[in-house]
Amino acid sequence: MRNVLIVALLGFLSGCDERPGPVASQATPGMDTVKVFLLRADSVKKTISLPGELSALEDVQVRAKVQGYVRRLNVDIGSKVRKGQVLAVIDAPEVDTRVQEMNQRVQAAKAKFQSSKDYFERIDKAAHADGVIAPSEWQRTKNQMLGDSAEYHAVLLSAASLRQTGDYLTIVAPFSGTISKRNIVVGSFVGNAGDQPLFELEDNSVLRLRVAVPEAYSSALLAGNAGELVTRSLPDKKFKAALKRKAGIIDPGSRTEVWEFEVPNGDGQLKAGGYADVKMNFLRDKPSFVVPGSAVVTTLEKRFVIRVTGGMTSWMDVRPGFNMGDRAEVFGDLKAGDTLVVKGNEEMKAGTKVAIRM
């Protein structure tokens, strides 16, 4: 009679439960009792800190295009320069001489062309009267004019090219920034192939931050599309870094994808070439299954969780997602509401009859 009352009471309590779930089963002699939980989907977030390297937004090695001696030097290491500012002037007397010579050739070619043009115009005017100018003479003077015209324009192009070479004697900044290296002094001979650059110029108003993101996080969303960084030189300050671009490939050696951030640096506190620790908050675009870390069993052959259905165990293969310490994100042939063992182990073979305890 007592057993009948207990069964009736259990039935009444289970009928009053708003969410139906597995009922703890009584263990029979020789049957193990295992602690289980109901699988459910949850939002997944993971915060990690990764090392990154700062570099200039733009950097360039400024070189000499023509040979000569440094006549004037206007900047030094650490100098702030503007785009188009003169950094140095190179002295090359032979270039100046060639420019003057070419200018004279231009004047001579111009005079020759003008003379043949005037002569042809007179011949052409006289040719309108019958029998005054032979057709062959008219054609000869025209050809002479066209040839002199072509020679004049060729000399003009040569002169422009040489003047361009002369412009290379003045070394100017290609963009605004800071001189980070200077490898010349007044009197240095420059312009040889293989020489060191005259200067190295960097734009540090905004810095690039490159971070190698592990493959497991490369497809996740970055909260706020930004990270937070601290540097070894300024450990008490935090800086915001906005994600701008991704490499789009996984490096086969490191199994990472390079993400590039940009960090405003108008006050110049951060230095290019420095290392930073970047804190990033990753999340999934939709809920996924999260289980206690102890529920995932890893062997040399497989990774699985143990599901209990009708008091019988089965091994369910899973693929790992985010590792969140005592919790783990898993993917596999699972569904919400599955009953899983809290502490799985490979000694609990599939097909084992167990009693469950919620």
Image (cartoon, rainbow, N blue to C red):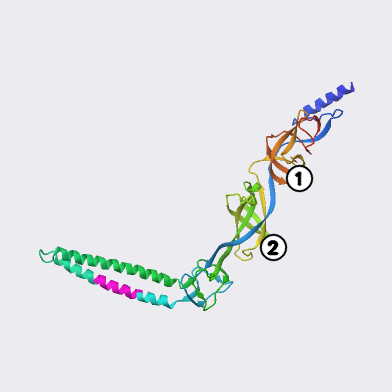
Vertical order, 188 against 313 (above or below): below
Residue 246: % across, % down: 58, 52
Q: Residue at x 38, y 74 (%)?
A: 99
Work out whether residue 259 or residue 132 is closer to the camera in this orientation and state it: 132
Work out whether residue 157 or residue 137 is closer to the camera in this orientation and state it: 137
Q: Is residue 164 left or right of residue 22?
A: left
Q: Residue at x 22, y 70 (%)?
A: 116
Residue 108: % across, % down: 29, 74
**Residue 232: assigned label:** 2
- Secondary-structure class at tag 2: loop
Q: Residues within 10 Å of mark 1 (few under 14, many from 20)?
A: few
Q: Residue at x 10, y 64 (%)?
A: 131
Residue 348: % across, % down: 79, 35
Q: Which residues are magenta?
A: 102-114
Q: Is residue 271 left or right of residue 97?
A: right
Tell me which secondary structure the magenta stretch mostly adopts.
helix
Residue at the left extreme, as displayed: 131
- Does residue 107 appear anywhere in the picture? yes
Residue at the right extreme, as displayed: 2
- Secondary-structure class at tag 1: loop
Image quadrant occupied by the N terminus: top right
